[in-house]
Image (cartoon, grey):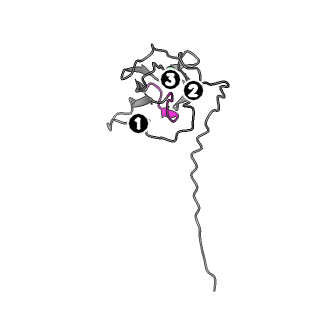
Amino acid sequence: MTRHRVRLATVGILACVPLLLSACGSDDPDTGATDDTETSAAEETGGGDDGATGEATIVIQDFAYGDPLTVAPGTEVTVTNEDSAPHNANDAGGAWEFDLLQQGESTTFTAPDEAATYDLLCTQHPDMSGQLIVEG
Ligand SMILES: [Cu+2]
């Protein structure tokens, strides 16, 4: 008698590879690894059209941008600063930039059309790092 055993091991690994932008000599006492994953929320307006008109949010908290955020090209990205320190979230390569946000302030920018991983930059705190991933 043969026992037929089919074992389907489907392993889906979403590898989030954190970019280690090692910034030496940080005086921040607050650079410990925090694991909160509630910082980014992508909202999709359930519609019928094909246009990628999504919205996404980056919340800056504790000198961090949260997990890398993946959006479609042209997505309206809202950035909110919840820290008492001023922050912004410019593209290190200059694809977009905006002024520093004070605590509680928000702004929006439009994600670039070119699919790539964009490094977020705070002009006040070069130690901060984060990514916006544009996927076509
Ligand atoms: Cu900052």
Q: Residue at x 34, y 33 (%)?
A: 49
- Residue 94 is left or right of residue 44, and the answer is right
- From the image, tell me which residue sits under label 2: 28
Q: Is residue 52 visible?
A: no
- Image spot of residue 52 (x, y percent): 41, 30
Residue at the image position 55 percent from the left and 29 percent from the top: 130
Residue under circle 1? 41
Near mark 2 (Cα within 10 A), the count class, few <14, some 14-19 or many ≥20, is few
Taking the spot 63% from the left edge, 86% from the top edge, the residue there is 1
Q: Is residue 116 left or right of residue 58?
A: right
Asked whether mark 2 lies closer than 8 Å to ligand 1, one says no
Residue 25 placement (x, y as % from top left): 66, 24
Query: Magenta stretch: dominant SS?
Result: loop
| Depth order, front residue of 50/79 | 79
**Residue ranking furthest to the top:** 99
Under mark 3, the amino acid is Asp
Q: Residues within 10 Å of mark 1 (few under 14, many from 20)?
A: few
Give the crowd class for mark 3: few <14, some 14-19, many >=20 residues within 10 Å.
few
Disc 1 to disc 3, C-alpha distance? 20 Å
Q: Mark 1 or mark 3, which has the lower sequence index? A: 1
Alpha-carbon span between mark 2 and mark 3: 35 Å
Residue 19 is situated, as x and y percent measured from the top left of the image, at 63, 33
**For the magenta stretch, what is the residue range?**
63-74
Residue 46 seen from this side: yes
The residue singled out by tag 3 in the image is 113
Q: Quadrant of residue 38?
A: top left
Depth check, mark 2 against mark 3: the one in front is 2
Query: Which of the 4 image quadrants contains residue 57?
Result: top left
Kind of element beneath mark 2: loop
Magenta segment includes 66: yes
Q: Nearer the viewer, mark 2 or mark 1?
A: 2
Three-letter amino acid code at disc 2?
A: Asp
